[in-house]
Image: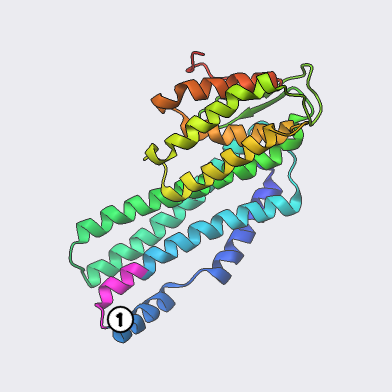
Amino acid sequence: MFPDHIKKLILEKLQVDLEIKGTDITTLKRRAAEKAVANGLIRPGMYSSEFVEEIQRRAKIIFGSITEVLTQVKIKPYPELNSDLINYYNDEFDYMVAHWEQNIKQALTEMPIPNEKIFYAKLTKDIDLWRKEHLMNIKLFGATIMEPAFDKGNTTILIQDSAVGVFNAGSGTVNSGTVSISQDDYAPVQEALKLVKNELNNLKAIDVIKRNELDEIINDAVNEIKKTQPNKSKLSGLFTVILVSIKGVEVLEKAYVTILHFLEKLGIVISNPSLDC
């Protein structure tokens, strides 16, 4: 886990940001009542809507607080960084959601709304999507911190709950930030990326916003490998996110393996005992 002084700094930053950027319950209720009167809507419905928006707002604040502190203090790369980032975000997210779900439950107890079961089903789905959105951004942020480590050899990266088990940038023939890749080397991986792009709309497990972001990441990867001297650390980060996203998609299994082999050409060996390739 992060050093104690950094954990304390993140917590302090988070508390300050939530106090400044978040909205307290009294203000939310007043805002909901004003909107209900102005628009002729039922007050309970406006309460629940305001509370749901606050959960979404606070999910973003948590992400921003974590990344701002770690950017300012310039934390050094270490093997468990990504898993620590994921765990820390999940802990803060779960604590926040539990608190606001209780507020919503209490508000709806005092003033019930029609179709309450449908409301809670949608809330659960929305919360899951917000979590996935920020966890993907956390992984991207972690990859940027780890970039310098890719150039120094013998670096192992554990990415929790992803397609990549262990990410080992070994001390092989490639030790600098740029590598020489021939047309024969990058042609297969370009085809693999093209296949992933074509299948994006069928990846229903990923929401539309994240599919669009993944499409941009694929474009970045394609552009990078076309360069005379592609940046190894940038490719490592981009392809890690792509692998994370397509894990377990049967139609993309061949693309997955092709990307793995391409990374091996960069001197990056990915070890995942559950993957037979």
- Left-right relation of 222 to 44: right
Residue 221 in the figure: left or right of residue 122: right
Measured from the top left, where is residue 75 in percent x and y?
Answer: 73, 44
Residue 208 as seen in the image, left or right of residue 121:
right
Quadrant location of residue 186? top right
Q: Quadrant of the N terminus?
A: top right
What residue type is disc 1 on? Answer: Ala
* Colour setup of the view: rainbow
**Which region shows up in magenta?**
40-49
Count of marks overlaid on the render: 1
| Residue linked to disc 1 | 36
Regarding residue 160, the answer to whether it shows in the image is no
Q: In which image quadrant can residue 19 be found? A: bottom right
Mark 1 secondary-structure assignment: helix
Q: Residue 92: x and y, percent?
A: 51, 51
Report if residue 20 is visible in the image: yes
Residue at 59% of width from left, 65% of height from top? 17
Q: Please say if 78 is above or below 43.
A: above
Comparing 64 with 198, the one in front is 198
Residue sticking out furthest to the left: 114
**Extreme bottom residue here?**
38
Judge the density around disc 1: few (<14), some (14-19), many (≥20) Cα neighbours within 10 Å. some
> Furthest-right residue in view?
176
Say whether residue 46 is magenta.
yes
Percent x, y for residue 150?
73, 30
Question: Magenta stretch containing residue 152, yes or no?
Answer: no
Q: Is residue 262 above or below residue 11?
A: above
Q: Please identify the dominant SS of the magenta region.
A: helix
Residue 37 position (above or below residue 84)? below
Query: Residue at position x 59%, y 28% from top?
Result: 190
Nearer to us in this view, 116 or 239: 239
